[in-house]
Image: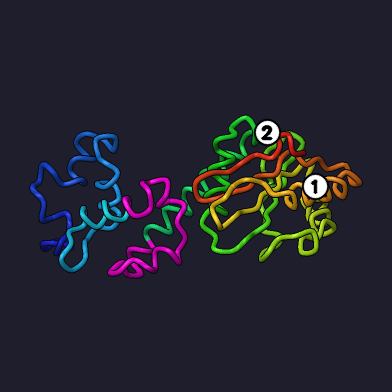
């Protein structure tokens, strides 16, 4: 578009426009709000794009919170149409893929922060419980991650034999288990501990190790191995 942008960055003085600032001074010179404003491009009726960007960051708890936000939560924002939601969701997916590439290139636990962030991006914003498995090779590099079960997770609804089948399919040497708590409480329950031990017993029969089980929320991912629960 060559004309003026309604409620957009073209209304700002040239020296304060985020696009010009980025080109002249680099991305580090921009605030989180300015970077997000560049992606959104235009505001909405009665609200310029920088105000919209800063309100989104405030609502979701900053960049990290926004990246862990699902499409359903974005749909609740008044005036945030499909085009803008698509941009944010696309950035989220790029972040997921970048972390996945990192975990495929080196051992998962060489970068525990990356593993936690990857699991939070994958599971943290889910509105329902999901039990997922990261399948690893003999060097503990990520082969694939699969959502295995969803709903209310108990020993009756998580089937260890299906995890065994998928581990054999991927020729996995080890796995990392993960499930989310939509309630926001990341503390593992007694049922989580019992389920972990059941899965460990099943996978031991085919010589596949369970390295950890993470309980994931939007804010954090708690390692059951670090808590001595495995």
Q: Residue furthest top?
A: 110
Q: Nearer the viewer, residue 226 or 112?
A: 226
Q: Position of residue 116 (x, y in %)?
A: 57, 41
Instruction: Locate residue 1 relative to residue 153 in the image: left or right.
Output: left
> Which residue lies at the image location 51% right of the left edge and 57% below the top edge?
125
Check disc 2: other Cα within 10 Å, few if <14, some if 14-19, many if 20+: few
* Coloration of the structure image: rainbow
For the residues bearing labels 1 and 2, Cβ distance under 8 angstroms: no
Q: Residue furthest front?
A: 190
Instruction: Locate residue 170 relative to residue 124 in the image: left or right.
Output: right
Q: Is residue 59 above or below residue 152?
A: above
Local secondary structure at mark 2:
loop
Quadrant of the frame with the C terminus: top right
> Which residue lies at the image location 45% right of the left edge and 67% below the top edge?
72
**What residue sits right under mark 2 in the picture?**
226
> Which residue lies at the image location 61% right of the left edge and 41% below the top edge?
222
Check disc 1: other Cα within 10 Å, few if <14, some if 14-19, many if 20+: some
Quadrant of the frame with the N terminus: bottom left
**Label 1 – label 2 distance at C-alpha:** 26 Å
Over which residues does the magenta segment extend? 57-86
Rendered image quadrant of residue 154: bottom right
Q: Nearer the viewer, residue 49 or 72?
A: 72
> Which residue lies at the image location 58% right of the left edge and 32% below the top edge?
111
Q: Position of residue 19 (x, y in %)?
A: 21, 46
Q: Position of residue 53 (x, y in %)?
A: 27, 54
Rendered image quadrant of residue 114: top right
> How many numbered marks appear?
2
Q: Which mark is residue 171?
A: 1
Q: Residue furthest right?
A: 205
Rendered image quadrant of residue 142: top right
Residue 205 within the segment the image draws in magenta: no
Instruction: Locate residue 196 relative to residue 91 in the image: left or right.
Output: right
């Amino acid at each position: 578009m060559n004309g003026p942008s309604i409620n957009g960055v073209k209304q700002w003085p040239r020296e304060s426009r985020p696009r010009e600032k980025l080109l002249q001074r680099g991305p580090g010179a921009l605030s989180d709000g300015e970077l997000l404003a560049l992606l959104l491009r235009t505001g909405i009726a009665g609200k310029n794009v920088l105000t919209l960007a800063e309100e989104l960051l405030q609502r979701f708890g900053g960049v990290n919170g926004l990246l862990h936000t699902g499409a359903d939560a974005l749909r609740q924002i008044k005036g945030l149409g499909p085009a803008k939601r698509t941009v944010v969701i696309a950035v989220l997916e790029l972040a997921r893929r970048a972390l996945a590439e990192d975990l495929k290139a080196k051992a998962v636990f060489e970068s525990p922060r990356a593993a936690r962030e990857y699991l939070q991006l994958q599971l943290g914003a889910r509105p329902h419980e999901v039990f997922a498995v990261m399948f690893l090779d003999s060097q503990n590099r990520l082969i694939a991650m699969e959502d295995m079960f969803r709903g209310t997770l108990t020993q009756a609804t998580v089937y260890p034999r299906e995890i065994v089948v998928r581990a054999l399919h991927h020729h996995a040497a080890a796995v990392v288990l993960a499930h989310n708590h939509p309630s926001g409480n990341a503390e593992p329950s007694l049922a989580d501990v019992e389920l972990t031990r059941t899965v460990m017993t099943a996978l031991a029969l085919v010589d596949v190790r369970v390295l950890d089980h993470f309980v994931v929320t939007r804010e954090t991912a708690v390692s059951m191995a670090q808590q001595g629960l495995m």
